[in-house]
Image (spheres, helix red, strand yellow):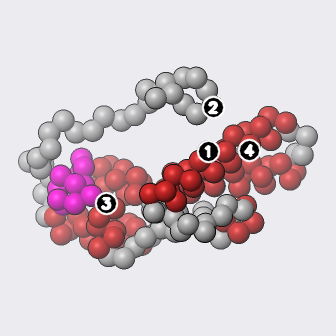
């Protein structure tokens, strides 16, 4: 599928582990991995960042292989739910940073165009998440009020 605002396809992605069984070098039991995931989530890390930290510091190639559950399933069991989905939150952060830049540099037309593109992606994602039931049907995007939902 092509990107939204350029006609490029994009190939950047890390490769997932080839085998879906627990590797021999992972010595952590499933409950220790689960506790570490919960601890990282309470510190404010996103799901993808939790996976990266677990891979780099603990040697866990994939949380689902070792713990038997996905990171999102573990967080749901422990009632840790972010206010916005991760991709939407990162787009909102980007839009807020561009708005802050435009306050100081109001003649930056490329930044205005970038903000317009970013906000169109945000509106599209909001529509998708409303349809899937992950956001409330009355959820509205406004930069002033959404600033409180997105933590730095």
Q: Is residue 14 left or right of residue 86?
A: left
Residue carrying label 4: 115
Residue, disc 2: 5
Seen as rendered, the residue at the extreme left is: 24
Find numbered disc 3 in the image and state the secondary structure of the residue it sits on: helix
Is the Cβ of the residue at disc 4 closer than 8 Å to that at disc 2?
no
Numbered tag placed on residue 121 in the rendering: 1
Coordinates of residue 23 in the picture (x, y in percent)? 12, 46
The residue located at (29%, 73%) in the rendering is: 77
Which residue in the protein does label 3 denote?
71
Q: Nearer the viewer, residue 66 or 133?
A: 133
Residue at the image point whose x is 62% and y is 45% from the top: 121
On the question of residue 151 being in view, the answer is: no
Mark 4 / mark 1, whichever is N-terminal: 4
Q: Is residue 39 visible?
A: yes
Q: Is residue 72 magenta?
A: no
């Amino acid at each position: 599928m092509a990107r939204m605002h350029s006609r490029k396809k994009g190939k950047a992605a890390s490769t997932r582990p080839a085998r879906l069984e627990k590797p021999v070098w992972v010595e952590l039991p499933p409950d220790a991995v689960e506790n570490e995931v919960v601890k990282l989530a309470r510190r404010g890390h996103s799901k993808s960042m939790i996976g990266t930290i677990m891979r780099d510091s603990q040697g866990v190639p994939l949380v689902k292989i070792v713990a038997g559950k996905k990171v999102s399933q573990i967080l749901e069991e422990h009632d840790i739910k972010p206010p916005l989905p991760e991709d939407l939150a990162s787009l909102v952060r980007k839009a807020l940073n561009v708005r802050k830049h435009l306050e100081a540099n109001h003649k930056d037309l490329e930044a205005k165009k970038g903000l317009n593109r970013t906000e169109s992606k945000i509106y599209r994602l909001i529509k998708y998440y409303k349809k899937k039931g992950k956001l409330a049907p009355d959820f509205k995007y406004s930069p002033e009020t959404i600033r409180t939902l997105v933590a730095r």
